Image (tube, grey):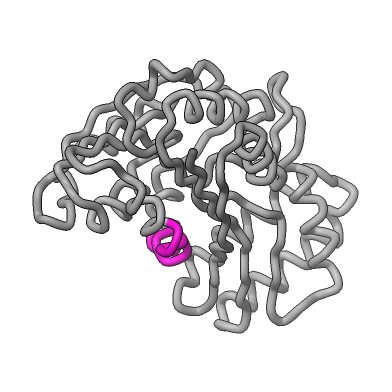
Amino acid sequence: MSEIIEVSRDWLKLREPEDARARSARLARAALRRLRPGPITIHDLGSGTGSMMRWLVPQSPGPQTWVLHDWNSDLIDRAADGIAPLDRDGRPVAILTRTGELSELDADHLDGASLVTASALLDVLTSDEIRAVVRACVAVGCPVLLSLSVTGEVGLEPPDPHDDVVAAAFNAHQERHAGGRRLMGPAGAAHAERLFLEAGWSVRTARSPWRLGDHEPRLLERWFEGWLDAALEQRPDLRDDGTAYGALRSAQVRRGALSAVVQHTDLMAWP
């Protein structure tokens, strides 16, 4: 996975406040109610710089240990640096890190897990990688909370005739073949849900949209640029119209005249 999925620390920092607002607090509370009494060990898959940990720790009882899994050692080292977040009882959490590919994940990597979490992960995995994650979680038998999986649904206001074409090209880019891997893209969350249900588990889902506008213009601008660039990479034939479309939308962002709803889904599963 490391040869393909590169995520910058700046992008993760920029999106973190909107991620925190968008995640389903209702599903998080439901997952926490299913934790066994006593010390908690939470394994966070594809942890990046630790945004899921910083969001969930203050809502959770302690003592807590977080085990952060990511292939990117730079991001995961950054997540472990600095002041540890405090649980809802005011105690700092313990943080461990593990570097490795999720395609190799098994139950041994989740040893002692009370809860398994992930954020913005399923859409950048392959079918086999999602199957490995689900198989490992089922083997451990603890609740699972997987947030912010892209669904492919985007709504821009004001609308433009190019919106649907660009959205379709972006979604195709999310499902591309890359480095010998076929990414699941917007189908990732539904695939994970099917696998948990086939294993006999219960599943709940909730929509977790980003709502971008003039309250966070930098995030809207960066998201739109990345969205359009991916679409044009997938469909070079759209480049001429796409350049004019991008200039129009960028001008709207600068005037505070553009907003976007980017849909995601959160998923909770339990035995």
Asked whether the viewer can see residue 82, the reply is no
* The N terminus - image quarter: top right
Q: Position of residue 250 (x, y in %)?
A: 64, 70
- The correct choice, above or below, for 186 with respect to 6 in the image is below
Q: Is 194 included in the stretch rendered in magenta?
A: no
Residue range highlighted in magenta? 17-27
The picture quadrant where one finds residue 71 is top left
- Image check: 198 left or right of 108? right
Residue 45 is left or right of residue 266, and the answer is left
Say which of 31 and 48 sits in front.
31
Q: What's the residue at 71%, 55% (across, down)?
A: 152
Front-most of 124 and 12? 124
**Does 98 sit left or right of 156 as displayed?**
left
Quadrant for residue 89, please give it: bottom left
Q: Is residue 145 visible?
A: yes
Residue 260's place in the image compared with 89, above or below, is below
> Residue 256's spot in the image, x, y percent?
55, 82
Name the residue located 23 percent from the left edge and 56 percent from the top edge: 58
Which residue is the extreme one toward the right? 237
**Chief secondary structure of the magenta span?**
helix
Image coordinates for residue 44, horizontal then vertical, percent: 38, 37
Residue drawn at 26 percent across, 35 percent down: 41
Where is residue 171? Give x, y as percent. 75, 49
Q: Is residue 25 magenta?
A: yes
